[in-house]
Amino acid sequence: MMRQSMPARWVGIFCAAVLGLFTAGCAPSWSESQTFVMNTVLSQNVEGSQDVTAENEKIARDLENKLSRTLEESEVARAVRSEAAVSVSEDTQTVARVSLEAWKETNGAFDPALGAFRDAWGFGQENPAVPKSEEIEALLAAPGAESIVTGNGTLFAGGAQIDFGGAAKGYALDKMRENMESQDVRNALVSFGGAVLAMGERQGGGRWRIGIRDPFSDDASSYIGTFELSDEIVQTSGISEQSFTENGVTYHHILDPQTGMPADNSLAAVSVVGESGIMTDIYSTALFVMGMEDGLRFADEHGIKALFISRDKKIRMSSDFDCRIQDLDSGYAVE
Amino acid sequence: MRSSKVVRASDWVFAGVCLAAAGILAVFLWSGKTAGENVVFRQNGKIVETVPLSENTRVELHGRYTNIFEIQDGQVRVVWTDCPNRQCEHTGYISSSGASIICVPNEVSASIQGRAGTVDAFTG
């Protein structure tokens, strides 16, 4: 039997120890990426190759090309222009079907036909402004979600100004998760606009830590509290996004379909947690429009995990909201 | 007569010392990567500049539009832009890891990275 000399053995052990520790420190590999799509930023931190993040970006871009109402050749834009039903992809049909079901389920609080209202207000555009009341009256009388029909691979707008902006990003997150799961990606964090998909654990172990942005702070990295998230999606709708001020009044971008005006209630933001991206996207908007009391009641009746932040800095949670809020800002109170 | 054991007690002692030394070295090197917070600037998704958060300076990013970022006293903000909606300017400032200022029209972002133990992402 061949025997090593003592120094050779020590060198071998030392090298193995160093190699082992550094290998453990480096693996597994994570990929980061950022791109701009659907008028927002898509940021990814994925335990996997750059191919995975590139595929996710392609998923979002392909969906934008189908669902955007501003890209002239998108399926939705073609449907809105057409006086007849147009052929659409399975994705567009799914988003249309789920959106219409949600429109009925929420009694119109979520409305996928507010495109003309968004144009009138100009949210996210160069010069947002309060529309004239006559313009809003005319839009309220125009065809709405009740005119939209989908099925058999087609979409019929019926004169409605379809806008799937309140569902498309959530649906895209669902498709990205499907893509990652099919490739055995276990750990990932994907931020898309105000939505976050958390899969598995963060780098170094432990559940992902999500901060709920303070809607009143000038510091965009200021949060009212944090919670841990794993294998779920959180989406938040609030007054701080795309707002503008005119004649001393600040207008936020979440429109009440009943009035055509920004939802005017006691809420500052609503966060919804769930496994479905498209439903968290839809419900966060719908619950905001409903307001604190009606929104809480709806969330409890439908088993939705929702957190409501009022303008007087009070926090209330639906009975199914099971995320423990940590690091709570002392200016906020949980009721 | 020499021992016929391949691994002796002294070897285990030495291996333990080596492991401890390597561990300390690894922790030292690893912590060195995250001790300081940096502001990472991206344009069209690619990192174009990384600046320590502790450095008071300005960074200009030119694309379809222009964004002038200011890093001052551990805070980052957009102090000037000619982008159409100027939402990046209205974002205010950021001061802790995990936070970003985004300019969608110019496809530019500034993110603070580096301090462990803070949030991984924001919602809202």
Image (cartoon, coloured by chain):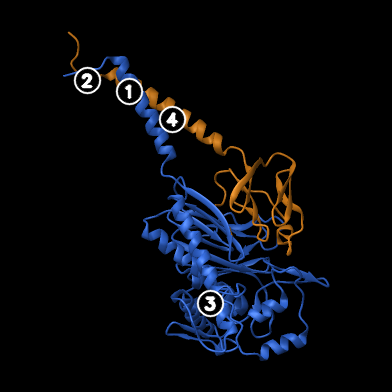
Residue B98 in the image: above or below residue A304? above
Q: Amino acid at mark 3?
A: Glu
Can residue B124 be seen in the rendering of this structure?
no
Q: Tell me the amino acid under the disc marked 4.
A: Gly
Residue A12 is tagged as: 1
The quarter of the image holding the C terminus of chain A is bottom right
Which residue is nearer to you in this view: A302 or A147?
A: A147
Rate crowding at label 1 as few (under 14), some (14 to 19) or many (20 or more) other CA atoms within 10 Å.
few
Badge 1 and badge 2 in a common chain: no
Q: Nearer the viewer, mark 4 or mark 3?
A: 3
Q: Residue at x 37, y 25 (%)?
A: A15
Identify whether A104 is placed above or below A40. Answer: below
Chain B painted colour: orange
Looking at the picture, do discs 4 and 1 lie on one chain?
no
Q: Which residue is mark 4?
A: B23
Q: List x then y, in percent, for residue A59.
A: 48, 64
Q: Are marks 2 and 4 on the same chain?
A: yes
